[in-house]
Amino acid sequence: MEKSLTSNPIESSILRSKTEELDTSTLMLHVYHHNKEKPKNYVIHTLRDSLTPITTLKELKKKKKESQTDQEKIAAAVVPQAQKPDEHPLNDEVVREDPPKPSRWQKFCKQAARAQVYDKAKHDPRSHPDTPHPSCESYFLHLPLLYGHGPPYTLRRGGHKRSPVQCLMASRSFWQEWKLEFGDILAQEGVIDGRGVVNWRVGTKGGKDGTLKGYKERNRRWWGESGKKWFYEQREAGHKCPDVPEKAKPEEVVNVRWVSPLVRPREYRFTWRGFVFIWKGSNTIDVQQKRFTRLSRVMTRFNHLKLVVNLPRGNAGQDPEKACDVELVLARYTSAMSKRKAGRLEIFQDAIDSFIADHAGHLSLPSVPGVTETPAEDLSLMGIKEKKVEVEPSSCDPFLDPRISNDAPIGFDEQKTQQRLKDLVVASGMCMIIGEFEKRQWLWEIILLIIDIADNAG
């Protein structure tokens, strides 16, 4: 079920005259690389850079100077001189002139000044930890640096790296497989320490028996490692993380796999609560056609993907051979040719709501931690036949809302399931985005190396 892609309703309300009128049921997420110093970190906002009220360094200095002059005037208590009635400013004709249009050089200088302060709390309201932007939903993807270890990414719900953690993302086999661990325990204090990793007092070595993998504290911090401020606080105040009798375990574990790299290079598959989700390539680009030039369409033709979920097989008339899996499109990712912006991730909220409402009974049970659910197609490739049980459709009231039907179990939290599915879409999408980006970087390095070798060989 393909839908017309839309931007965030917040953005359309801010600049309705400058943007196209799009469907409000789609959540538009803009994916950016987090500053030049740490390109492996990502920040995701619903409000894009061009619509964000950024305070540049020059404007900040100007505001400080104006505030100082105002304070001086108040201290001096300057009393204005009495004016005659004929000389009152309201009696004079006020001639207002339109401000001159900025030149291309002025626009370039302004964009360069804004680019220097992106993702900084003093200048960017989307990344402020105390007073975040009220109209912006953000995610932050942080990769901790710990020499001798490969800690997982932490997906945080917020615009900075101190936001509560929602998911751990660990890559294996050159981005061919990702392990996603979800749980409310990740947001508790002390589970994820100041370095951005699971503390060893909460987890275990290697993640034994389905627990979280913990990382020990060192007596010495090497230059460039994460958690500089936290390390010195721990050394002064001592260890603040007490030992726990029971090690922390994730609520759900999802494995995202890059399926058939040589045959289907743009297909990532995972199973969540019995349903198979697939990120697959899409050549169609029907989003903001005016902003896509012919060169960008050609260069990014093989960089766009969409997320579909395979629903149970439906009967195509009386012929069982024509029965096929129904694919429901939940999200789509559109790549962008930019140094800072990676692309746009669009989540179809109506499709997610209908999917949860129609399959509340199946979605009530979370995925078992430590157990990998294998899709049916992978089982067939291994020579294992899947056992299927046919169930006759039960008679039901056609006017009954499926969200309050008997299929929905008692205590089913639809809001939490909806938020978990949204976090899963963002996490799996970032796995795909990072994998595609790293593969392109490696490909360019190999091509440049071959050119260098061929040049030196002559």
Image (cartoon, rainbow, N blue to C red):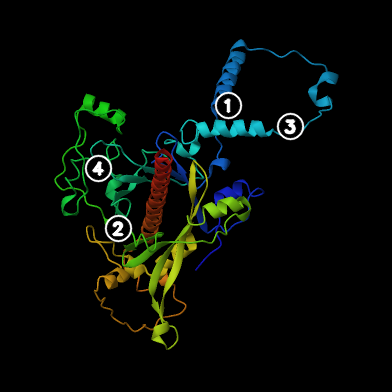
Looking at the image, is mark 2 or mark 1 nearer the viewer? 2
Against 296, is 98 above or below?
A: above
Q: CA distance from mark 1 to mark 4?
A: 40 Å
For marks 3 and 4 on the same chain, the one whose residue lies earlier in the sequence: 3
Residue 100: mark: 3
For marks 1 and 4 on the same chain, the one whose residue lies earlier in the sequence: 1
- Identify the residue at image location x=20%, y=32%: 218
The residue singled out by tag 1 in the image is: 59
Q: Position of residue 213 (x, y in %)?
A: 21, 46
For marks 2 and 1 on the same chain, the one whose residue lies earlier in the sequence: 1
Q: CA distance from mark 3 to mark 2?
A: 56 Å
Under tag 3, what secondary structure?
A: loop
**Mark 1 is on which residue type?**
Glu
User: Which residue occupies the extreme front position in the image?
Assistant: 458
Q: Position of residue 53 (x, y in %)?
A: 56, 37
Residue 198: mark: 4
Residue 255: mark: 2
Viewer-proximal residue, 311 or 411? 311
Left or right of residue 236: residue 68? right
Viewer-proximal residue, 285 or 95? 285
| Circles 1, 3 touching at the beta carbon (< 8 Å) | no
Looking at the image, is mark 1 or mark 3 nearer the viewer? 3
Q: CA distance from mark 3 to mark 4?
A: 55 Å
